Amino acid sequence: MAALLAAASPAWGHDGTDHGATAPAGEARQVDAGTDGRASGAVPSPRGTRWGAGYFPNVPLVTQDGRNVRFYDDLLKGKAVAINLIYTHCEDSCPLETARLAQVQQILGERAGRDIHFYSISIDPERDTPAVLKAYAEKFQAGRGWLFLTGRMDDIARIARKMGLSSLTDSADRDGHLPSLMVGTADGQWMRLSAMDNPRFLATKIETFVGGWKDRPAAPDKSYAAVKPIRDFDAGGYLFRTRCAACHTIGRGDAVGPDLQGVTERRERAWLHRFIKTPDAVLADKDPVALELFRKYKEVRMPNLRLGDGDVDALIRYIEAQTVPGRDRSAPKEG
């Protein structure tokens, strides 16, 4: 079996740079459907082939702390890693990606930075200096073992091609790249996941993939009769857990963004609907409330989640229901 690290067609990223990836001719690929509908694949790497030091570009990069590193020698060699592409001025998926991965780090605990290393590589190096990346990492409370990296655009494009972090579908995406997460080791296996997936699911997949299951104590058998009922199994509750809980709580205090308890009482419904649906447009219009929130919460941009009017209404109803006096206001955590 051979590892496939790249898709077969070129794609153009945010600045028109070729972020495509070319698969080796004749290599096999093992693909299965991910939980969010995206494809994920994992194929072992054969010995004695080009996979390894001769395949991965050993280009120079710079960390958020200004440290110079080499992609293969310092970041890949001898490590298990999770790699994604971001840029700090992103108004689409990047903020949610980063918030999700911060949750994954928390779930992994001591394993993060020891058994698995996280790398977020900017595809906008002109604006994303080490200082900008450091501030971005702090906004999302990035933990130990998570590097935010910048470098020359040509070198970053080479990494994207070799790592399979972009494909033909990226050019059709409004943001210029899909939220792919590549997990693996330089001389072993690689698996593509979605960085937007459920954080507990991602943490479990990463733990299992890098061998963490070997020293995990066996879980006791449980009866199906003991399974707790699913809470808030409706459109609004689902949307909150999957799209909002990475950055917001309801009644548990501020997180990356504000606590949403009582927000339906504080804001006019029409304003709230527009802000949830098109936060980028509201901020671009210099709406005073949006600007105040932007400044207060460390200039983290709320992503445009591409919700329809019905979805927005369902989400508002859910948040409103959580703030009814006398009701348990603690919205369930993601995962």
Image (cartoon, grey):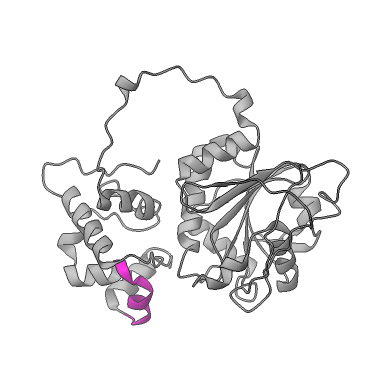
- State the residue in front, 195 or 49: 49
Name above or below for residue 136 compared with residue 76: below
**Predominant secondary structure, magenta span:** helix
Residue placed at 33% from the left, 68% from the top?
Answer: 293
Q: Which residues are magenta?
A: 276-286
Outermost residue to the right: 48
Q: Quadrant of residue 276?
A: bottom left
Compared across the picture, whether 54 is left or right of 165 comes to right
Percent coordinates x, y for residue 316 in the rendering: 22, 59
Q: Quadrant of residue 135?
A: bottom right
Percent coordinates x, y for residue 247 in the rendering: 39, 54
Name above or below for residue 3 compared with residue 137: above
Is residue 281 inside the magenta stretch? yes
Residue placed at 45% from the left, 70% from the top?
Answer: 91
Q: Quadrant of residue 244?
A: bottom left
- State the residue in front, 190 or 93: 190
Percent coordinates x, y for residue 258 in the rendering: 32, 58
Outermost residue to the left: 325
Residue placed at 40% from the left, 51% from the top?
Answer: 246
Residue placed at 26% from the left, 52% from the top?
Answer: 235
